[in-house]
Amino acid sequence: VAGYSKEGMPSTGHTCAVTTAAGLRCWGANGAHQLGAVTPGSLASSPVNAMPSLLGHIRDVAIGDSRTCVIHDTEALCWGNNDSGALGNGTTESSETPVSFATAHPILDIEASQTATCAIVASSAPQLDTAVCAGSQQYGMLGNGLISTEAAQLTPQPILKADNFPLTGIVALAHSGEHGCAIVENRELYCFGHNHVGQLVLGSENSELEIAYATPSPFY
């Protein structure tokens, strides 16, 4: 699309794209002020300028369920619906203004799904880059070793290996809502979360497909 450099994967209700001027334009539903413009609850059938105060500094965008996240310079900012704690700011209160997806290190990439937000975090060297997630833990889909149908993870926590040390060397990340996957620098693929239809590619038999893997399992 002319004038745009990146588009976030569309959610069920809205879409956003980064402009060539490092701004953000969004359109669609706005029930939780996820468009970052116009009156909450109204619709935008054509692109509107989202969060004009961020113009010139937006590098990437990710779209969740009535939630929008951007990389602003090297920081992750999110706004909109926060029922699952996926804004990552320590609360479940929705926000009409950008809040920090609280991490102490620069953000390299950000992904959002219906239930979670995850980001690749820079370290002192690429082989040490990690990823953090916040949001629902119902099926272990944050990869932090925990499964809970009640308690959400309200601040970003590292994706962990089975030995409880952070998964490192992460170069790519994706999240579907109930499971996530990460590619590390040696090209191994690690997945975590719900496996009810075998989406973690573990070769499980049908009787085992209801297992939720709370820490990443490698797929070669």
Image (cartoon, helix red, strand yellow):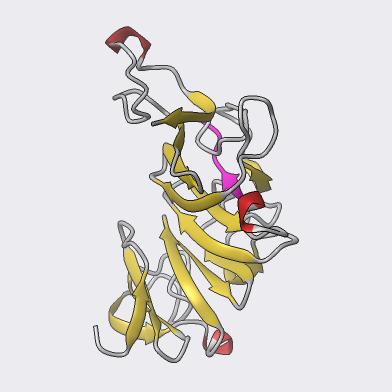
Per the picture, the main secondary structure of the magenta-coloured stretch is strand
When the figure is inspected, residue 145 is found, relative to residue 12, above or below; the finding is: above
| Residue depicted at x 55% and y 46% | 84
The answer to which quarter of the image holds residue 28 is bottom left
Q: 108 or 13, which lies in front? A: 108
Q: Position of residue 193 (x, y in %)?
A: 46, 31
- Residue 37 drawn in magenta: no
Q: 43 or 105, which lies in front? A: 105
When the figure is inspected, residue 108 is found, relative to residue 48, above or below; the finding is: above
Q: Which residues are magenta?
A: 130-139
- Residue 134 drawn in magenta: yes
- Tell which residue pokes out farthest to the right in this image: 104
| Residue depicted at x 60% and y 67% | 76
Q: 32 or 142, which lies in front? A: 142
Q: Position of residue 113 (x, y in %)?
A: 43, 51
Q: Quadrant of the N terminus?
A: bottom left
Asked if residue 197 can be seen in this view, the reply is: yes
Q: Quadrant of the C terminus?
A: top left
